[in-house]
Image (cartoon, grey):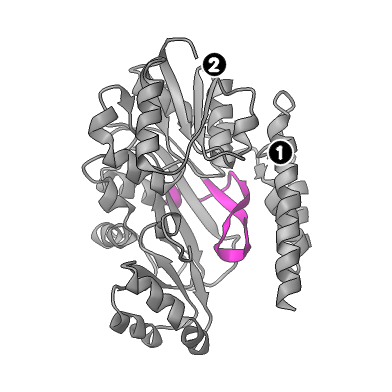
Amino acid sequence: MSKVKHCALVLGGHVNGYSIIRELFECGLRDIALFDQGKSIASKSNKVTYYRKIDNSIDTLKNEILFLKNSCEKIVIFPTNDLQIEQLNEIYFDISNFCYIPFNHKTVMKSLDKTYQYQCCAEIGVPFPQTIIAVSHDDLRKISTMDFPVLVKPVKRDDLKINIFRNMYIKDIEGFNKKYESLANAISQGVKLMISEVIPGDDTNIYAYVAYRSKKGEILNEWIGKKLNQYPGNFGVFSSACNDAPEIVAEQGRKLVNHMNLMGICEPEFRYDPRDKKYKLMEINLRSMMWHRLGNLCGVNIQYTQYQDAIGRHAENQLQILDKKRHFIFMTHEILNLIFRRGYWKFFKHNLFSSKVREFAVYCPGDIKPFLYSIYFLIISLGGRCLKALKTK
């Protein structure tokens, strides 16, 4: 990359990273850098000007950003996972004079903590699930007092740093007893666990509010949406999504991001509880997620809004297109769900064919290599799942 005034730096080349790159490119930006750990779909994109394969150490990240400074006066950073946010926070004062780092440095670590997120919900009257926090083996035994099933998650994304589970579904007390050793091992490693009631329903009742909030405390753009399905199963990640959500999701989302004084791209995610007809917070993500290109396709350029704000340009307020139904689909996950998830055909058919307007997460006619690489990943995933199934027989 020759010396430029501004550039965007995307950290991570999975679907969320590639979606950021596509949006910025479509909005006219050509100076786009990508750092990832290799073997990513975005690393194959012709929209990337500067690419570096890095490991996940904080020193490597810092040194590569300092090196990129030789080619760019102002770097606008787009993280795509929580570990990157934590690392950027640690090197904040080493790079903040020439980088736009998209979060509130004073509160970001607290804001990543789901315990604090639920505390804020209680303070402003946003519904959240019945929850206990486990920091000791005695706390773990309190699970037996809860109504099953329950979902157990690390309070922070510790699974990105050590070998533990991302989430664990426990159906009943027998399941708890079987999984106690794994839970106790996490506690022994210093992991704080959040144990929450499982809200009834499948993965079709998850909604989100997505916003960019400036460092002046203004929400410059926002949109709402719904996940149609996840992979794998009810507690996985995005498979398909649509631009259909009630206004209460936006109202609760705004209250949270303002109350917590969040900055940058943030996404409070809610699950609808049919028992009391409330939308209950599941978690708040402080970065771009895999399905956030949906907002771009519905007229709201959240990523470009961050870029414009970061370099001091006026970011135009955009209204989300809600009157035309749009489906955003990650075919790799849809195919895996169809093959391995019993009864998924009805969801597959709905996600692909019930909307006249549908967009695919990776397919781009002018940038075909990421799509071809995603097919390779699908084959690898299929082989891994089949081998795992054979071993369990």
Q: Amino acid at mark 1?
A: Tyr
Identify which residue, 217 or 283, lies in the foreground: 283
Q: Residue at x 59, y 41 (%)?
A: 15
Residue pointed to by mark 1: 373
Residue 247 horizontal side relative to residue 136, left or right: right
Q: Secondary structure at mark 1?
A: helix
Q: Earlier in the sequence, mark 1 or mark 2?
A: 2
Q: Position of residue 150 (x, y in %)?
A: 46, 76
Q: Which mark is residue 188?
A: none
* Whether label 1 touches label 2, CB < 8 Å: no
Looking at the rendering, in which quadrant would you find the C terminus?
Answer: bottom right
Left or right: 307 in relation to 393: left
The residue range painted magenta reads 225-250
Q: Residues within 10 Å of mark 2 (few under 14, many from 20)?
A: few
Question: Of helix, strand and loop, which one carries label 2?
Answer: loop
Task: Relative to 174, say whether 257 is above or below.
Answer: above
Q: Let me know if residue 1 appears in the view.
A: yes
Q: Find the distance from the CA under tag 1 to the CA under tag 2.
A: 25 Å
Pinpoint residue 359: horizontal percent, then vertical percent.
Answer: 69, 37
Q: Was residue 198 drawn as part of the magenta stretch in this picture?
A: no
The amino acid on which the numbered mark 2 sits, given as a three-letter code, is Gly
Q: Say which residue label 2 marks.
A: 28
Residue 376, given in percent of the width and then of the height, sits at: 74, 44
Using the image as rendered, state which of residue 317 and residue 80 is in the foreground.
80
Residue at (58% x, 65% y) in the render:
234
Q: Residue at x 76, y 50 (%)?
A: 379
